[in-house]
Image (cartoon, rainbow, N blue to C red):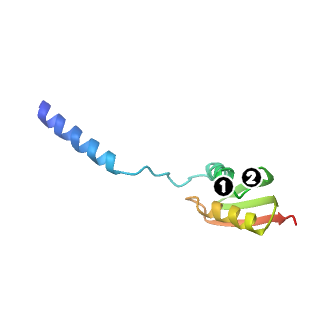
Amino acid sequence: MSRNQVAIVFSVFVVACAGSTPRIAPATDDATLTVRVRTALLNDPVVHASEINVTAQNGIVMLRGQVHGQSEANAAIAAARRIAGVRDVQSELQVNR
């Protein structure tokens, strides 16, 4: 391959990569899914993630623990559902009044 051909291939590659947006691949196992949901909860300003336990089995996420209101429970459930690879979210969150 000549230098010009290499330069053209490289230029096409750079342009193609620059236009793509990074994507997070769906979780392929329950351990990865658990970590991603836990991270989403930690990054949600409404959720007190330290009081919520997350487990996953066959793509079904279970949330257990204490929350400070129904809005926090709803936010935790919504955050878990947004994670690629989550098939369902089950909640055993208890609302403290």
On the rendered structure, is 88 left or right of 1?
Answer: right
* Residue beneath disc 2: 49
Q: In x, y percent, where is residue 22?
A: 43, 49
* The quadrant where residue 74 appears: bottom right
On the rendered structure, is 92 left or right of 8?
Answer: right
Q: In x, y percent, where is residue 49?
A: 74, 52
On the rendered structure, is 3 left or right of 59?
Answer: left
Q: In x, y percent, where is residue 96?
A: 87, 64
Residue 53 visible from this viewpoint: yes
- At a point 77% along the width and 55% down the height, the residue shown is 52
Q: Nearer the viewer, mark 1 or mark 2?
A: 1
Q: Quadrant of the C terminus?
A: bottom right
The three-letter amino acid code for the residue at tag 2 is Ala
Q: Nearer the viewer, residue 49 or 53?
A: 49
Determine whether label 1 and label 2 are within 8 Å by CB. Answer: yes
* Residue beneath disc 1: 44
* The quadrant where residue 94 appears: bottom right
Residue count near mark 1 (Cα–Cα under 10 Å), binned few <14, some 14–19, many ≥20? some
Between the residue at mark 1 and the residue at mark 2, the CA separation in whole angstroms equals 8 Å
Farthest residue, direction front: 45
Vertical relation: 12 (above or below) 45? above
